[in-house]
Image (cartoon, rainbow, N blue to C red):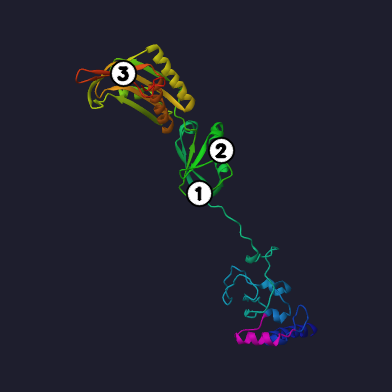
Amino acid sequence: MGLENTLKEKAGMKLHLQLSPTTATHPRVNTKLQAPAAQTKQGEERGGASSAHARCGRRGPAGCACALRRPDASASAPGYPARVPWRDGAAVPDPVLLGQTPATSTAAVGPPDFGGFAPVSPAKVKSIPRTLVLQVEVLYFAESAEITGIRSETISVPQEIKALQLWNEIETRHPGLADVRNQVIFAVRQEYVELGDQLLLLQSGDEIAIIPPININEVEEKSKDIIKFTSEQLSVDEVSQLVISPLCGAISLFVGTTRNNFEGKKVISLEYEAYLPMAENEVRKICSDIRQKWPVKHIAVFHRLGLVPVSEASIIIAVSSAHRTASLEAVSYAIDTLKAKVPIWKKEMYEESSSSWKRNKECFWATDD
């Protein structure tokens, strides 16, 4: 009888719990539970039982055994609302207690168990800068092309990179470039950039050219003074060719020709003679003076002797220099000084069978009668 009464009492207790959830006694903790009126009303308004945690008097899923009966997050059991990521005040599914149908509660509950790792609020996460990586084309010329064995290649580099870091990246690919490290320069979008701390903001598809020293294949070229007195016809092209130099950007010429008149008289030719040894020495002195005054490369002075018909050249002076100013001024100085100092004489032959030795006004020892 004692055992039978005990079983009846337990069965009655279970039935009482199922029929009277708001005044039930929890069989495990032997504590009378009373659901808060507000929460009970809230549960009733939703058409379901009140919060299971309100019934057990605990707050948070880790506070009672019903947490062990919480449906798995990945499960989609009938009757359970879809679970959403936890956040303060968000709806979470209630655990199952004593066979009750689960209900949704907005009561303040603690965060779920994340296995010992607390979630980090997105507002507290610092933004991590990300470097954009893009592709550029590297062009190799002259010695750099010989070292690498290629003319171009495409590489991936950060969008923002210092010029020296970019060179180190290229040198890593082609170690032989270390031999010309101090002799090259970049050209980025066809603008020169030295290998230093300059920050480059690259764009996809940019051309990065490796520019070695620009050589003009210069052979050590000795300056020349070319002096010639001749009875043969002079050629402007011949004299010009003699002073051409790859180092020069200018050739200035003076060409003196025979004109057909003088003071109303018709001139048919000129006749020249010279004291050759002294004339050549004086012309050499003029060349030396020019080199002291201007940075010129080659000088040529050709003078014709004997008869020189009208319109033919009697003297050609050519000077080459890197820039035009030097050669132009040098040519002007050469002809003025030659007329003043070089022992060369000129006789004009007229149509009426007369002639006249002409005196240069530049001659420094001549006096006016």
| Three-letter amino acid code of the residue under disc 3 | Lys
| Magenta run includes residue 43 | yes
Labels 2 and 3: the sequence-earlier one: 2
Residue 84 appears in which quarter of the rendering? bottom right
Labels 1 and 2: the sequence-earlier one: 2
The alpha-carbon separation of the residues under discs 1 and 2 comes to 20 Å
Q: Position of residue 135 (x, y in %)?
A: 48, 47
Question: In the rendered structure, which segment of residues is drawn in magenta?
Answer: 33-51
Label disc, if present, on residue 357 of the rendered structure: none
The alpha-carbon separation of the residues under discs 3 and 1 comes to 71 Å
| Residue designated by label 2 | 172
Residue 63 appears in which quarter of the rendering? bottom right
Label disc, if present, on residue 202 of the rendered structure: 1
Toward the viewer: 139 or 271?
271
Q: Residues within 10 Å of mark 1 (few under 14, many from 20)?
A: many
The local secondary structure at tag 2 comes to helix
The alpha-carbon separation of the residues under discs 2 and 3 comes to 74 Å
Q: Residues within 10 Å of mark 2 (few under 14, many from 20)?
A: few
| Magenta run includes residue 229 | no
Question: Which residue, as the protein is rendered here, is positioned at the far right?
Answer: 2
Circles 1 and 2: CB distance less than 8 Å?
no
Circles 3 and 1: CB distance less than 8 Å?
no
